[in-house]
Structures are given as structure tokens and as C-alpha cells.
Amino acid sequence: MCALDLFRHGDRHRGVVGLGRHRPGDRHADDTGFGHVLSPVLPRDGAYSSSPPAPSSPDRTGRVPQRHPNRLLDRPGARARQSRHTTSGGSPMAALPQAADFLEESQTLYAAIAPLSDADLRQPTQFKGWTIDDVLVHLHFWNKAADLSTTDEAAFTALMGQLMGSLQSGGLRAFENAQIPERGTELRDLWIAHARDMAARWADMDPRRRLPWAGPSMSARSSITARQMETWAHGFEVFDALGLRRQETDRIQNIVVLGVNTFGWSHKVHGLPVPDTLPSLRLTAPSGALWIFGDDAGAITGPAVDFAAVVTQTRALADTALRVEGEIARTWMENAQCFAGPPETPPAPGTRTVAG
């Protein structure tokens, strides 16, 4: 799915989805990526944050009383987010709580594939015929690349140089396969061991630490959120192939926010005019909390997991329980793309489903 986990929104406007004079189209993707589904649009800190929406504490219904997503998304570490990442005494667990979300996402996927044999891991998925092995090669390569960006900048730069050179010959997939020669259960065990070690070390990292990447630098918070998003999105095809339904939690909020952040980009990448206002979103979290974004330009209601699936193009809109009202809302959902690269067509109805 993702090859490069960053592209930057580099203009001078601060409005994420454009309220008033700030148009959502003011933000644009100006880094490049490779592969089918590239990373979520992850902003440079100071423009807006990948932290989930919560400028104020939720009320008793779980609703976050917020109408201005530009302020909502600009605020890292807001209070509702901290409610999922605090100890029983209320003190923060880690400087970078998104590392725990990445770990949980990885552990959830690992639990599904832990019983599989080498032969089982070679079975194809509904994502372009990738096998589960292919998914693990891809995830492990980019997890390691993100980790390398924190420990050895020179080595990371050299790796990206080799990758760019490979695009003129064998392509990205061939480069990933050459860099990650292990397969089957050996690869599975290496992938999860590294993810666990990486998450533990990243937990205490400064969220605003700048890390080199293939394009502009990115924050540690953005980098680890990208790793969670990739694991979740590629995990979908693995769960589908195995005939399993993943148990979702409110950590999906990170990916929902990425989808909201890329409202303007979804239009621009498909050559569509960017509306002045974001549709009203009323999304039900796995916990039952209500997450609210946007304005009054139509409405999108339904499960937050379904919204995340549409913006990552892991489900067709018609195969979800989302209710979409209004031309702006429907155009967005039919073209949603929270990842870099050229315009991609969402899966056709019925083509990405749970097997069996």
C-alpha cells in the first residue's frame, strides 16, 4: 500500500479544511510517493497535527463540542486524546502515545497471522493479488526505514538514494523484496519483534522531533502515525483473506483525522474543485463515542471505521454503512484518498470483502 509515508502540506495557511477565508484547497500535496496506496497525508507540525480531534473534553455523550476542525486538528495532545493514553492516576504514559497505537495495531494483525504456516502466508489477498508475505515485506521494510531515520541519518539517506535509483530499473516492489529476503514464519516473527522494539523506543521520543524522510522531514508523531495507518490499512486485506473481522478500538481516531485532513487533497489529486467548506461528519467510534467535524455542506454519518476504510480505499463506499447526503459530501466520499501519489480509483463494490 504505502511506500513513502509522508507528503507535506506546505503553504502558509493554517485552516485544515477551510472555514471562512481559509479554503481547504489551500493545502496541497507537494511531496511524491510510490506504490499503489501511499501514506496518509501527514503534515509538518505547526501547520496541523495528526493528533486526534479534541480541543475540549467530551461531554457525557462522548461528543466533542467543536465546529472548527482547523483549530481542532492544530492542537497536539488534546484532552480527549489523553484519556486513552493515561495511567489510572491520570498521568501521561508516554511522550509519544501514538507509538502505543502503532504497537496495538501491529499486535492485532500478528494475532491473526500467528497460527499460519509458511504455505498459509503465501495465500493471495484481494489487494492486487498481494500475498500475506508481500504485505509483511512491505510493512517490515517501511517500519525499518522509519526506525533508521531516527538512528542513522546518513544510512537512511543512502537507503533512499538506492530506492530512488531502483525506480528506474526493477521498481519499488523489487527493491523491497531485495532488502527483505526473509519469507514465511521467519519474516512474520522478525516483523513483529521489530515493531515491538520500535514502539518501546519511540514511546519516549519527542513528538516534534524532526526526522528525515524521502521528501521533506516529518515529525516523530507523523512518522509513527503513518506506520499505524499502513498496518491498519494493509491489515484489512489480510483479515479479509483469512475470513476474519478485526476488533476495532478508538485508536482508529488517528486515521479518521488523517481522512479529515486530506479533504482538499482528495479533490485536488482527482482534478476537482475544492469546496469552501467541509461537510458535517458525525462518526460513531468503536467505543460508542460521537466524533464531530465540519460544517453544513452536506452530511456524512455512520461508523468511524467505515469512514477510515473509505478514505484509505480499503472498502467501496457502497459496501459501508455510511450515509452520505449532499453533492459535496458524496463527491468527497467517491474520491477520498488520504495517501500520496497519483489519483487512485476506489475498489469497486463487492471486490473487497471478508472471505467466506
Image (cartoon, rainbow, N blue to C red):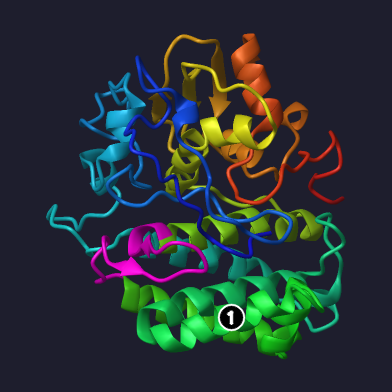
| Residue for point 76% across, 31% down | 319
| Residue for point 47% across, 16% down | 276
On the image, numbered disc 1 is attached to which residue?
A: 161
Question: x%, y% of residue 120?
Answer: 83, 75
In the image, residue 205 lies in the stretch drawn in magenta? yes
Question: x%, y% of residue 29?
Answer: 53, 45
**Label 1 secondary element:** helix
Indicate whether 90 appears above or below 168: above
Main SS type for the magenta part? loop
Residue 257 location, quadrant:
top left
Specify the segment rendered in magenta: 203-222
Closer to the camera, 196 or 355? 196
Q: Amino acid at mark 1?
A: Gly
Closer to the camera, 115 or 301? 301
Q: Quadrant of the N terminus?
A: bottom right
In the image, residue 223 lies in the stretch drawn in magenta? no
Side of 300 where 138 appears, left or right: right
Question: x%, y% of residue 157?
Answer: 49, 81
| Mark 1 burial class by Cα count in 10 Å: few <14, some 14-19, many 20+ | few
